[in-house]
Image (cartoon, rainbow, N blue to C red):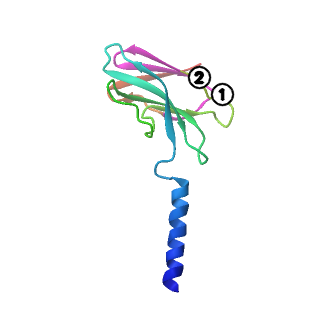
Amino acid sequence: MKKLALLITLLFVISIFNSCNLPGDGSNTSVRENPNKNHTKKAVLFLRQAGATVGDSYQVTITNYKTQFDTVAIGNTFTVDDNHGEAYLSPKCIDLNWVSDNTLEIIYDKKLRTFIQEKFVNGITVIYKTK
């Protein structure tokens, strides 16, 4: 009887973890890709829809030009959300401009809440400005 109760408890716990989808929670939708002039690197702006547990966010990742878009990875450069409704979350709130082959400028709405704001990624210097 104890083994049956333990088995039922274990199955219950496993089903709870599976329903939360903890390891792979979220999916990414590419919004735009901006390559540098020499097409050696690119900046990718994408929407991360994290489901019921976390709000949506816009993220930027810098990768090699030929790298395929990853639909599950988090951004390695810049991450923002709508700051509890203070800002409107849309692709228009973030601009990506290559100043040179090794420098990316990210211009974003100052009302957005920032989580990640790296200044150097994959050999690229990143400059931030608010609008």
What is the crowding at mark 2: few (fewer than 14 residues within 10 Å), some, or many (at least 20)? some
Do the numbered discs 1 and 2 sit on residues whose CB atoms are within 8 Å? yes
Query: Which residue is the extreme one toward the bottom?
Result: 1
Q: Earlier in the sequence, mark 1 or mark 2?
A: 1
Numbered badge on residue 31: none
Say what amino acid the circle numbered 1 marks. Answer: Tyr
Q: Tell me where residue 85 sits by quadrant.
A: top right
Identify the residue at image location x=66%, y=29%. Answer: 87
Name the amino acid type tagged 2: Cys
Q: Bounds of the magenta span?
A: 95-116
In percent of the image, x 34 and y 19: which residue is there? 102
**Image side of residue 126 versus residue 57, left or right:** left
User: Real-space Cα distance between discs 1 and 2?
Assistant: 8 Å
Q: Is 65 left or right of 26, judged from the image as shown?
A: left
Q: Considering depth in this image, is 92 or 20 the residue closer to the camera?
A: 20
Measuring from the top left, give residue 14's x and y in whole percent.
50, 64
**Pointer 1: what residue?**
88
